[in-house]
Structure formats: structure tokens, C-alpha cells
């Protein structure tokens, strides 16, 4: 076992972990943060996407022991985030989820798109949004609603559409 | 699946990493971003006794402008290159290629050095570094050494790195502003490993004319008859693709087209 110190959703956390425990299992089993979902568990489906030090990452292929000193934010940590609030409303309005399994990872990726690529507000930017979303798999929606929800928030934040 | 049990160490410098790898007697494995090794561990394709984490090794994550060349540390992430946070010796090619590696969540963690050391033939950096004739800088138990681009990757997943070696970075000579590039890769889905790569670099100011057939069964194939290939000679292109070992009809066709498109882009 190794001692691990990190920040999770703003709280300092100290725990003893086995080196083989990946971050997603650590968050779910040790911290009770079950909003982080595990799909493929080898870095392909994107369901487990969380923020590590402010950037999206796959928590299933990052070992918890490697997160010493890191700042991790899971879907639970975005409750009061203004952008995530807009995204939640847009996902609901656009029917961007059905079973909800991919949604936590989808939202973390969606927020990164909105923050990093705020200029993708035009109709012709849909293709780029789809490329950026390609690392998150959804088996329910066919992505239409998810893409529209992200476009909605991009346009709201650019002041093109009313919030 | 979950990874099999392993020990974990986080050395503070390359020398310490080399010592730990040497002490591991072949069962210790370095990990950088972990975006290739992580899945392999979870799938238990790799079951090392110990992981030597390079994330704490000083100096790996930086890049430096050396005047006529750029040094890119092995720990620089694909996202840092995509975002232009490191000097670019290629006037745009490096960020463009970086932006199409896997997905942003992977690019945020995955490193140039990790990808090169892993040496998947279908990955971008092993092919691009060969095209750009990068020099590989390796730290080993006997000290630092440099390896030429043609000597680094020897076969699929096989490089000049010994069991106790750490790749510390690559040095890429700067291309002139008038250099022209072509880079085309076939992926069935955005972010997947390439099924075929074609790449071209032409820099008259530096006397560089190179073309490459990549995503083969082994190390990338540097085109031998450059003039004929760059002139678009179909027979010459097909001969190079066969020389690269891509003779199965589907694979052959993909590689011929990928190289053709890379040539067209560089010549446009």
C-alpha cells in the first residue's frame, strides 16, 4: 500500500492505496463518488472522464497512486459550476441523454469543448464538435442531442442566443 | 479488467529511474503518461513487477529552442504540442499531427516520449520523427547517448532503448519557413490508430526531400527513390509501398493512397 495525498472536489484527501488501483475505482470505492462511471476500463469509451489538474483525463487508465498532489474534479464537483449548470439545462432541453451512463464523462468533455473552443458557434462548426466528442461513446442518443446541447451553450455564452 | 499487482516507485531524476529499471532485472517498466501502458496493464497484456513513474523526473516535461533546432522533452504531452505551448520547428505540422492523436482526454496525459518508447507502428510520433530525422536522446546506466532517427525504432514495439534506458527527449532541426509538408493518415474512426500513413517533407533551403510510408507492420519505411515518388510516378509509389512490406491488397491500396495524398498536399 502507498499513502496518497490529493485534492478531490476541493477537499484534501489522504488514503492508503494499492498501486494497481486506478483513479476511477479509488473515487468510486474509497470516496463514494459513484458519478464517475466505468465503461470499457481501457481508455476508449470516455465514461470515466474526470478533470485532473484542470484538464479532462481518463480515470480508468490513470493509477490513483500517480495522482499524488493532484487536483481531481469529478462530476459531483461541478454542482455549482456556472458552465456545467448551463450544460445540464441544455442536455435536458435537447434530450442529450437517455440511460445516462455516458453522461458524466460526456459533460466533462462538453465543458472542456465550451471552455477551450468558445468560437465553435456556427452551424458549420458541428463537424469539429463531433471530432472533439469522438472520445466519448454514447449508445442511446446517436449524439444528435449531445451535439445540439453543446452548440446551445456555446451560442449562449457567445451572446448569440439568450440563455 | 483490473491491472495485476505491481510495485510503484517515483524517482526524481533520470539517473534514479535508470537505477530502478536496472534493479528490476527486466521486470520493471517505465511509465510516462500511461495512455498506452495503462490500457495494457488493465487488459493484463503487460504485467510488470514494478512501475517506474517518470512523471517526477526533472527536465522531461520541458522543451527548449536551441537556435537551429528544438529539443522536445519526452514528457511533453500531445496537448501541449497541439496548443502551441512548446516551440515548433515545423511551422505548424507538429501541432496539426498532435491534434489528431487519440482524444483530448488522452492527449492531456499522453507524452511524446511514451509514444516513441512504446513504438506502435501505427502511432504518429514514431513515423513523424523518422520523417523529420529527429535525434533521440537517451539516458542509460552508462550515461547519455544520442541515436539517429533511422536507428531508434527497430521493429514493432521494439526500439534502441535498453531495459535500463530512459528516453529523455528528441531534437528536431528547424525547417525553413518555406518548407512544405504533407501528412495523411487513414483512420476508420476519429482518434483511432492509423491503418496507413503517408508523409512528405520538402525543404529546398535545407536540401531536405523525404517521404515515408508509415503504419506498416514494423518500423516506418523511408522512401528510397524520392525524386520519382515526389514526381507522382505511380510505379515508384507502388514499389515503395511494397518495399515497406504492405503487399496485402487492402493494406497496399490504403498505403498507396495515403502516400499519394501526402505528396499532393506537399506539392499543392
Image: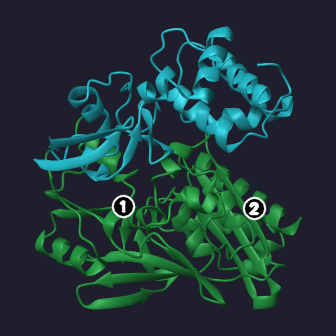
Chain colours: A cyan, B green
A140 up-or-down from B121: above or below: above
Residue B93 in the figure: left or right of residue A9: right
Point out which mark residue A153 bears.
Answer: none
B169 up-or-down from A86: above or below: below
Q: Check the picture and name the quadrant holding the C terminus of chain B.
A: bottom right
SS of the residue at dot 1? loop
Q: Check the picture and name the quadrant holding the N terminus of chain B.
A: top left
Query: How dense is the environment of label 2, judged by Cα within 10 Å: few (below 14), some, or many (20 and up)?
Result: many
Q: Position of residue B53 (x, y in %)?
A: 28, 62
Seen as rendered, the residue at the extreme right is: B268
Point out which mark residue B262 bears.
Answer: 2
Q: Inspect this view and state whether residue B163 appears.
A: no
On the same chain: label 2 and label 1?
yes
User: Which circle, 2 or 1, is nearer the viewer?
Assistant: 1
Of the pair A163 and B131, the residue shown nearer to us: A163
B52 up-or-down from B206: above or below: above
Question: In which quarter of the view is residue B8 placed?
Answer: bottom left
Q: Residue at x 43, y 88 (%)?
A: B146
The total of numbered circles placed on residues is 2
Query: How dense is the environment of label 1, judged by Cα within 10 Å: few (below 14), some, or many (20 and up)?
Result: many
Determine which residue is flagged by label 1.
B32
SS of the residue at dot 2? helix
A68 up-or-down from B241: above or below: above
Of the pair B5 and A63, the residue shown nearer to us: A63
Q: Chain of mark 2?
A: B
Residue B217 in the figure: left or right of residue B197: left
Report the Cα–Cα distance between label 2 and label 1. 31 Å
Q: Inspect this view and state whether residue B164 appears.
A: yes
Q: Position of residue B88 (x, y in %)?
A: 67, 72
Question: In which quarter of the view is residue B71 placed?
Answer: bottom right
Q: Position of residue B186 (x, y in %)?
A: 64, 48
Q: Residue at x 34, y 44 (%)?
A: B39
Amino acid at each position: 500500500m502507498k499513502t496518497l495525498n490529493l485534492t478531490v472536489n476541493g477537499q484534501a484527501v489522504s488514503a492508503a492505496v494499492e498501486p494497481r488501483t486506478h483513479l476511477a475505482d479509488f473515487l468510486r470505492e474509497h470516496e463514494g463518488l459513484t458519478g464517475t462511471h466505468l465503461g470499457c476500463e481501457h481508455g476508449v469509451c470516455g465514461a470515466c472522464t474526470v478533470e485532473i489538474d484542470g484538464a479532462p483525463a481518463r480515470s480508468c487508465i490513470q493509477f490513483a497512486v500517480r495522482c499524488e498532489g493532484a487536483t481531481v474534479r469529478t462530476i459531483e464537483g461541478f454542482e455549482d459550476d456556472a458552465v456545467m449548470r448551463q450544460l445540464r439545462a441544455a442536455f435536458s432541453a435537447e434530450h442529450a441523454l437517455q440511460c445516462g451512463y455516458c453522461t458524466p464523462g460526456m459533460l466533462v468533455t462538453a465543458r472542456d469543448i465550451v471552455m477551450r473552443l468558445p468560437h465553435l458557434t456556427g452551424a458549420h462548426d458541428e463537424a469539429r464538435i463531433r471530432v472533439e466528442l469522438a472520445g466519448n461513446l454514447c449508445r442511446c442518443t446517436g449524439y444528435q442531442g449531445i451535439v445540439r446541447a453543446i452548440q446551445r451553450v456555446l451560442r449562449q455564452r457567445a451572446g448569440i442566443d439568450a440563455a | 479488467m483490473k491491472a495485476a499487482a505491481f510495485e510503484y516507485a517515483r524517482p526524481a531524476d533520470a539517473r534514479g529511474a535508470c537505477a530502478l529499471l536496472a534493479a528490476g532485472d527486466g521486470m520493471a517498466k517505465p511509465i510516462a503518461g500511461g495512455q498506452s501502458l495503462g490500457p495494457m496493464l488493465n487488459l493484463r497484456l503487460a504485467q510488470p513487477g514494478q512501475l517506474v513513474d517518470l512523471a517526477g523526473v526533472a527536465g522531461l516535461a520541458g522543451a527548449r529552442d536551441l537556435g537551429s533546432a528544438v529539443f522536445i522533452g519526452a514528457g511533453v504531452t500531445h496537448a501541449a504540442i497541439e496548443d502551441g505551448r512548446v516551440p515548433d520547428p515545423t511551422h505548424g505540422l507538429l501541432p496539426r499531427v498532435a491534434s489528431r492523436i487519440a482524444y483530448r482526454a488522452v492527449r492531456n496525459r499522453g507524452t511524446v516520449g511514451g509514444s516513441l518508447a512504446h513504438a506502435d507502428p501505427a502511432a504518429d510520433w514514431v513515423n513523424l520523427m523518422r520523417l523529420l530525422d529527429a535525434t533521440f536522446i537517451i539516458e542509460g546506466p552508462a550515461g547519455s547517448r544520442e541515436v539517429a532517427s533511422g536507428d531508434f525504432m527497430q521493429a514493432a514495439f521494439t526500439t534502441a532503448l535498453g531495459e535500463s534506458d530512459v528516453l529523455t527527449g528528441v531534437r528536431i532541426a528547424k525547417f525553413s519557413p518555406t518548407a512544405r509538408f504533407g501528412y495523411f493518415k487513414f483512420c476508420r474512426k476519429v482518434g483511432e490508430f492509423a491503418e496507413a500513413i503517408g508523409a512528405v517533407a520538402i525543404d529546398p533551403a535545407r536540401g531536405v526531400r523525404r517521404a515515408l510510408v508509415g503504419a506498416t507492420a514494423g518500423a516506418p519505411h523511408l522512401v528510397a527513390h524520392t525524386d520519382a515518388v515526389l514526381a507522382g510516378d505511380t510505379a515508384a509509389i507502388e514499389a515503395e509501398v511494397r518495399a515497406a512490406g504492405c503487399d496485402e491488397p487492402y493494406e497496399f491500396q490504403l498505403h498507396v493512397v495515403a502516400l499519394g495524398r501526402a505528396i499532393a498536399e506537399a506539392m499543392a
